[in-house]
Image (spheres, grey):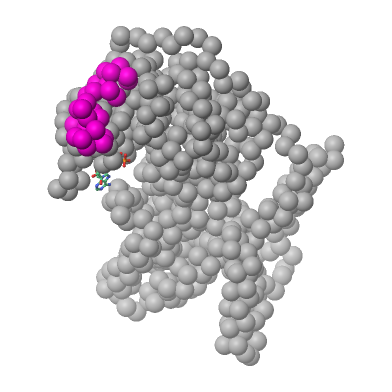
Amino acid sequence: MAVNAARDLPKAVAAIAIVALAFLPMAKMPAFYESFIYLIFFWVSLSTSWALLSGFAGYFSLGHAAFFGVGVYATAALTTKFGVPFLMTVPIAAVLAALLAAGIGAVVFRLRRLRGELFALLTLAVTFVIATIILNTPIDGGGGVFMSAVPLPHLMPTQTGTIYILGFAMCVLTLATAWWVAHSRLGLGLFAIHDDEDVAEAKGVPTFRYKIAAFALSAAIAGAVGGIHAMYVGFITVAGTFELTVGLYVVLMSVLGGARHWLGPAIGATAITALLYAFISGGEAIMGRAIVGLILIAAILWLPDGVIPAIQGWLKRRRAAPVTTRAEVVPVVPTTAPQISERSILQVRGVTKRFGGLQALAGVDLDVREGEIFGLVGPNGSGKTTLINVISGFYPLTSGTITLDGAEIGRDPAHEIARRGVARTYQIPRPFVNMTVLDNVALCATFGGPARSQAEIRDEAMHWIGFTGLGGKEDVLPAGLNLHERKFLELARALAARPKLLLLDEVLSGLNPTEIDNAIRLVRAIRAQGATIIFVEHLMRAVVELSDRVAVLNEGKLFALGAPREVMRDPRVVSIYLGKAYAA
Ligand SMILES: Nc1ncnc2c1ncn2[C@@H]1O[C@H](COP(=O)(O)OP(=O)(O)OP(=O)(O)O)[C@@H](O)[C@H]1O
């Protein structure tokens, strides 16, 4: 009962606030206050829309003013030059801004090198380009656009009341969208992109599509906000619309409140707008601005992740109850004899991979049988990890073919390959650092393997957490795990996708002898559950104990293939590992 009341209280408060704010213009408030509250709605919507891509997925944009500006000028041009009714221009503004973002994204999001600072600078450049185009064409022409003759619909008794209610509706719609995205599959994928985009793709997240969707949604909201704001401003200029400070304020507001939380930017926007009003509206505007700056610096130093995450962390620490749903530890003992079929699950034919002038793979042919543990060894730099990377789709092939279960996958994107049943681990663990152990594994169960309900995904994740011995660590962030546990988290994530083919890249490196024995038992148990395993390993004891067959790579070519003991005793293999002197 008490739990339900605590859970329902925020919803009740939100409902009351929405109703009260919606009816505020009826209360014949002074126009000044209507305008001030409108400005809060405006900044909440704009900063929340920025966070949909930049906060959630970590693609920091400094050019949000571009999409907002497209919206402002779409409404200005359509209403003043073509006589389109104002309300009709708002969705058009949203669509135009979304199309612009999707167009930019379609080019930029394909290129790995355009992440981070380069993306931020690029968005800034887009703002300048659009501002210049608008300034030098009849859309503005340099003289600005007067909106005073554009009729405003009588949604409320006063003009400021109408602008207020439109800003309010936009704000509610934006927050609802942000909540929905944050709790959806899209949001989960965006959070994973934020932490490690390449790993997200390898786990089955369609990263390109998700980034485009988030960018277009973010721009659409900014465009609609701009459309409404055009009527608020009344006289539009390029300098005022595409101001650098618009792009900077939304960043500051979102970061202050917590850019990765759907409500964070709203908290930051409300705080900063109120602070600016409190300190700048008096006679000492410059001093006031400096005080606001100092308050923000202090807030960001004290709360680097933002206000909402800080509050969440504090509440979590206060509640710090024992974990109620602890994953059961599954005994890691293979129960059935391995069933290796004669059928090849994976066929690699003539695979080459070149990095500039370096030939990392020089025509590899391999067949991996269904149900076997296939060891992949070779000296440093022989191409083992590169082969794992091309099979999992991380690197495109230079030439050759790779067939999984009869289907050619050599040119598929990594997320498609993951969906077809290939999972991998990383030599150096690459968990999603802002997600708990449970969320890390649940994400892989969501995007890899068959479609499942939320409850099934959670059960699946708990099963593999128990299986890998991480029970009790469900709520821990990866930073709280030791190397052994992080390696096992890699395994749990891969297994949660129920792979047909599991690619293990040096899972044993860095482990102590007891941990290695545990890991060897675990790999056997994984195979007993029906997966085929390719594992890259330098530890020869493990290779000989685990593998059904071993392939040796040398200088990007298949050098030897066969039963582990024979291959490892082959003098030619000994010579490439230790030099000719040891080979006799
Ligand atoms: N992204 C890359 N860009 C350029 N060269 C690369 C890249 N990845 C791998 N290489 C090169 O390709 C060759 C094969 O590297 P790879 O990592 O596949 O070897 P490996 O057998 O896994 O080695 P190790 O056992 O040390 O992990 C090496 O010469 C390496 O420097």
Residue placed most toward the observer, 81 or 343: 343
Q: Is residue 297 magenta?
A: no
- Residue placed at 64% from the left, 38% from the top? 473
Q: Is residue 254 left or right of residue 563?
A: right
Residue placed most toward the observer, 215 or 84: 215
Q: Is residue 165 left or right of residue 420?
A: right
- Residue placed at 59% from the left, 68% from the top? 300
Magenta span of residues:
557-584
Ligand 1 quarter of the rendering: top left
* Quadrant in which the N terminus is drawn: top right
- Residue 437, compared with residue 303, is above or below; it is above
Position of residue 327 measured from the top left corner of the image (x, y, whole percent): 65, 29
Q: Is residue 565 magenta?
A: yes
- Residue 287, compared with residue 496, is above or below; it is below
Q: Is residue 408 left or right of residue 81?
A: left
Q: Residue furthest right?
A: 1
Quarter assignment of residue 573: top left
- Residue placed at 64% from the left, 41% from the top? 475
The secondary structure making up most of the magenta span is: helix
Whether residue 226 can be seen here: yes
Q: Is residue 80 left or right of residue 454?
A: left
Q: Residue furthest left?
A: 357
Position of residue 295 measured from the top left corner of the image (x, y, whole percent): 63, 76
